[in-house]
Image (tube, rainbow, N blue to C red):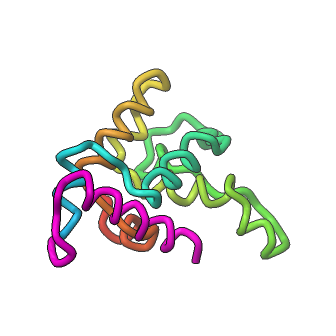
Amino acid sequence: MQTERVLIQQKLALRCLAALTSGESCRDSFKIHNILTVTLLHIREVILLSPIQPQGHQDNTRYASKVGPSPHHLSLFEKKQSYEGALLYNHIPEFLRKQPHHSFKTQLTQRLQERLFYTVKEFTDNMY
């Protein structure tokens, strides 16, 4: 995939910046320099740009802060970024979902910088 190629180039640039050898891990350097991987940039932008709307009720239920994906009939719809954004939004911790709109982006970025992921699957499996 193109994302993997960009991630490899991003790691090479970070190795030059942090003076790392080819055998050393880049994870700590990403955190030290507060750099998001290309995968995390994609995740952040998809979450921020997707039209996330709360559920239709105000009841205090267990999953009230989660967003349901839009109903659809075609599998092509599942490739849209708005659909992916709703699914990724549901994987972020509840305290982030309850943040006011003006501080949500900052809090999300800080959380993503703390927990570094190289793939979307890694994000969905380990975000909590």
Residue sitting farthest toward the right: 73
Depth check: give the residue in front, 96 or 2. 2
Q: Is residue 37 left or right of residue 46?
A: left
Residue 11 covered by magenta stretch: yes
Q: Is 12 situated above or below 97?
A: below
Rendering coords of residue 44 (x, y %):
48, 47
Rendering coords of residue 113 (x, y %):
29, 47
Q: Is 44 situated above or below 72?
A: above
For the point 78% across and 66% down, the residue is: 77
Residue 75, quarter of the rendered image: bottom right
Depth check: give the residue in front, 19 or 36. 19
Q: Is residue 103 left or right of residue 14?
A: right
Residue sitting farthest toward the top: 102
Residue 8 covered by magenta stretch: yes
Numbered-mark total: 0
Q: Is residue 21 left or right of residue 37?
A: left
Depth check: give the residue in front, 8 or 86. 8
Magenta stretch secondary structure, dominant? helix
For the point 38% across and 40% down, the residue is: 108
Rendering coords of residue 84 (x, y %):
61, 60
Rendering coords of residue 61 (x, y %):
44, 46
Q: Is 22 situated above or below 60?
A: below
Residue 55, quarter of the rendered image: top right
For the point 50% across and 50% down, the residue is: 66
Quadrant location, the C terminus: bottom left
For the point 21% across and 75% down, the residue is: 22
Quadrant location, the N terminus: bottom right
**Residue bounds of the magenta highlight:** 1-24
